[in-house]
Amino acid sequence: MYHSLIINVGEDYINTWDDWFLIPSSRPVISPPIERTKFVTVPGRDGNLDYSQSVSGKPTFDNRTGKIEFYLENDIPNWDWETAYTTICETLKGQRVRMALEDNPAHYYEGLLWVSQYKSSKGHSTIALEYNLHPTMKTLNVGAVVMNVETLRLTKGMEFQLLVGVGPTNTFFRKVTVTAAPKGIVEITKYGTVKGLKKGTAVITAECGGVKAECTVEVGAFETHVITRNLDGVTETNPVDSVVDGGSYQNILAVKDKENTTLEVSLTMGGEDCTSTYVTMDEDKLLAQIKMDAVTGDIQIAATALPKAEAAALRLEPLAASMTLKRVNGSFQI
């Protein structure tokens, strides 16, 4: 942790270290607002009269203003001072932002943030971010943490993609801590899957902002079904190759070239076509979600990125009505 700022610009949440590799020269603080005062000298009496609250009936405050200086990490590939400066300036230019301290993500501020000073040198480069924020500090805590499954069965060596959602989606708590206990029964792989190691039962706990969710995992000898795929110009989010009988399976498929291609997907389970039942396509035909609550046979996935003109020619009949798939901001994949 480098005591970062978390900056919300549009739908993006930027961590000044994770995304911009900025290290504050001192621990960042947001200046308190200064109360607006008005004192008037009245002839014939001692002291001054305070008219500060005569109109509003309560204290009024000016905006919070200040400056935070950062050192730029110089050893990041393809991230030199010029690239960093240009990226940060373009991101913040003309934008109203929400901003929180990584050390205190339950509270945030709204206003303007911009690059006010910059200096490049061989030893280190510095960038200063100046802010002008509304005096009110707002509170937004994590309300819920959920997983896509509450119980899970695996065989030794089998993997499952465990998903974690955090609500509300606009929270400034952007990191989820995941643990498995007892150790040695399952592990969380670097690909974001849960892998069975040996027979037994373990509990996976996801925690964010003091709120937790749990999933109980049983590793044993269970019947399994194979997942095979044929992907052409398409990426996927779930790399697992098998699933326990009766278990759930989810995946998201997307075309690599969003400008010139569209997505065609077919899905079979146990040799039977089930595309219309378990596949949901987004409006632009660039993204598809597979969601199966109970797998009862081997799964085959075929997904192809077709040129848009060719794909349009193939769709001679209207598609069946389906839900529109929307991206969910603020969700985490572990």
Image (cartoon, rainbow, N blue to C red):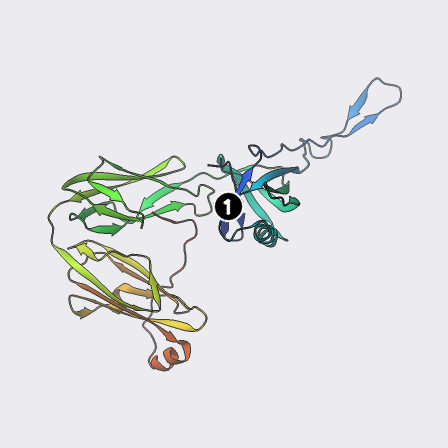
Q: Is residue 41 left or right of residue 133?
A: right
User: Picture quarter containing residue 287?
Assistant: bottom left
230 in relation to 22, above or below = below
- At a point 62% along the width and 33% down the height, the residue shown is 31
Q: Is residue 78 left or right of residue 179?
A: right
User: Picture quarter containing residue 225?
Assistant: bottom left
Please state the horizontal and vertical placement of residue 202, each as a whole percent of the image. Answer: 21, 39
- At a point 56% along the width and 37% down the height, the residue shown is 24
Q: Nearer the viewer, residue 131 or 232?
A: 232
The residue lying furthest to the top in this view is 46
Q: Is residue 244 left or right of residue 76?
A: left
Instruction: Bin the neighbour count of mark 1 within 10 Å (Cα to Cα): few under 14, some 14-19, many 20 and up.
Output: few
- At a point 23% along the width and 51% down the height, the residue shown is 159
The residue lying furthest to the right in this view is 43
Q: Secondary structure at mark 1?
A: loop
Q: Amino acid at mark 1?
A: Asp
Please state the horizontal and vertical placement of residue 114, each as a whole percent of the image. Answer: 63, 47
The residue lying furthest to the front in this view is 122
Q: Nearer the viewer, residue 248 or 21?
A: 21
Question: Label 1 belongs to which residue?
Answer: 75
- At a point 47% along the width and 42% down the height, the residue shown is 172
Please state the horizontal and vertical placement of residue 155, each as a whole percent of the image. Answer: 15, 49
295 in relation to 151, above or below = below
Q: Is residue 168 left or right of residue 118?
A: left
